[in-house]
Image (spheres, rainbow, N blue to C red):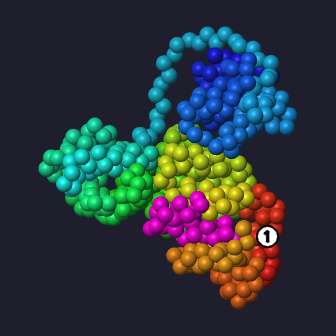
Amino acid sequence: MRFRFDNHELESELRELTRDGVRIPMQPQVFDLLLFLIAHRDRVVSKDDLVAEVWGNRPISDSALNSRINAVRKALQDDGKAQRLIRTIPRKGFRFVGDCEELAPPARPVVRAPEPATAAAPERPAIAVLAFNNMSDDPDQDYFCDGISEDILTALSKVRWFFVIARNSSFTYRGRNVHITRIASELGVRYVVEGSVRKAGGRVRITAQLNDAATGSHLWAESYDRDLVDVFAVQDEITNAIVAAIEPQIYAAENFRARRKPPAGMDAWDLVMRALSHYWRITREDHVMAQALLEKATAIDPNYGQAQALLAASLMFGVHLGWSELAKVAPIAERAAATAVRLDYDDAWAHAALGSVYFSTRRLADALSEFETALRLNPNFCMAQGYYALALSYAGRTEDSFAAAQRAIRLSPRDPSLAIYYGIAGYARFMTRRYDEAIALAREAIRHRGDLTGAYRVLVVSAGMSGDTQTAAAALAELRRTQPDISLSWIATQLPWRSDADREHFLEGFRRAGLT
């Protein structure tokens, strides 16, 4: 279908929107939303209609929908006040109201385009999840074992960095005494997850193990003992814990492999794994190293979405910690994140990266929408959960922020960013004037990492507002050590509050602590 309206043309086959002949870049979901509104311009389209058509009936928040409507309006040079082309019908939905003409598609000669000469996509590590063994006396408990295994397999499949072997292949080894090395060879995988379930009375013990088939070594193993008050709640809890533990172990193993290669022999995947190891160390020096490795990876393969996503996330992480200048890196990060989303819309990292750009550039509604999308794609993605919690705080939704930060802490209690999650929880408590709780959470964050700025900021303002001048002064001295250029001006201009009152509350805490 081809439509002309105003000074625009939209062609569904080529998925192009042009204005006066100039192509307008749009994210795939935004394009789909516009196309659906135009195709059904004879009626009011409800939220349910849009969710069914554009989101495939996946549950979405009102903020996510409104963010996408605003993105459509922006592409058309419309806005929510004028509603020149897209009108909001209160409590009913939306309608495309522009004068629109449906055109015949232009005749195009059939030409076979040459294949672009791009670098081969990096090979993702492959993983198989075997059916967990039923160690109980009751054979009827096989369903519970299968449920655990299938949930782990499904959750790992949402991590787009890995290739996960389908259940129909990996479950064929159930009850067979086959060595891990042979299983890996037959399935073509590098890593194998296996485990067992033992139920007795009202208790269950689940063990899980991650194996490196190439070396025959165990990378990780853990046991979980639970009361079976709610079978399905226990199943969900343990699945989340196992997946959250497995993911970083594979990154670490892949980084170890990359480090054994000579620099000239590293491909884009190796470079990203090395960059990821620097990213999680969260120091200024490692931040610089990660940037260099990611820039090299994207130069080798510009269409490597995960490299683009990690580059954007790393750049914006540096801004929040005071290591980088927002105006200098934000345009680079936004281009990289948008590229990552375009290359793989279902990659949670890509949406988290784009959300981090929107967050730091004061587009909080868009940021929340991107983080919510990332968490729908991968509910076990701790980094997205932490970013989401932070954005909620700056948007004024402090109770939701505290709950999200607590989820990140529970999901990954050994996470390298645990100090940041405690700091975010502390900030949420500060915003609700619970200064004693904020101080305790900030101190817990500092106990995990004593060199990060966020926790010291929370400790300074909370102590300042509670009148604890000694603690405020000591925390401010530490903050100046970790962020020497900290000032009231930097705080007022670099942090993206929605509410002026919330910004003033934060600044007042610093003033009482002695910052100028």
| Image spot of residue 173 (x, y percent) | 20, 44
Residue at screen point 76% across, 70% down: 506
Query: In the rendered structure, which amino acid carries the disc numbered 1?
Result: His
Look at mark 1 in the image and give the residue it sits on: 505
Residue furthest to the bottom: 470
Determine which quarter of the picture holds residue 81. Answer: top right
Q: Is 421 inside the magenta-drawn segment?
A: yes
Say whether residue 465 is visible: yes
In the rendered view, tell whether residue 480 sits above or below residue 407.
Answer: below
Q: Quadrant of the C terminus?
A: bottom right
Residue at screen point 73% across, 31% down: 93
Which one is in front, 297 or 355? 355
Magenta range: 403-430
Which one is in front, 427 or 271? 427
Q: Is 306 inside the magenta-drawn segment?
A: no
Which one is in front, 326 or 232? 232
Q: Quadrant of the N terminus?
A: top right
Residue furthest to the right: 82
SS of the residue at dot 1? helix
Q: Does residue 387 appear left or right of residue 76 in this picture?
A: left
Determine which quarter of the picture holds residue 255. Answer: bottom left
Which one is in front, 218 or 19? 218
Residue furthest to the left: 177
| Image spot of residue 422 (x, y percent) | 57, 70
Residue at screen point 82% across, 64% down: 501
Q: Does residue 423 appear left or right of residue 255 in this picture?
A: right
Say whether residue 16 is visible: no
| Image spot of residue 462 (x, y percent) | 71, 77
| Image spot of residue 237 (x, y percent) | 42, 57
Residue at screen point 67% across, 66% down: 428
Q: Does residue 498 appear left or right of residue 353 in this picture?
A: right
Secondary structure mostly seen in magenta is helix
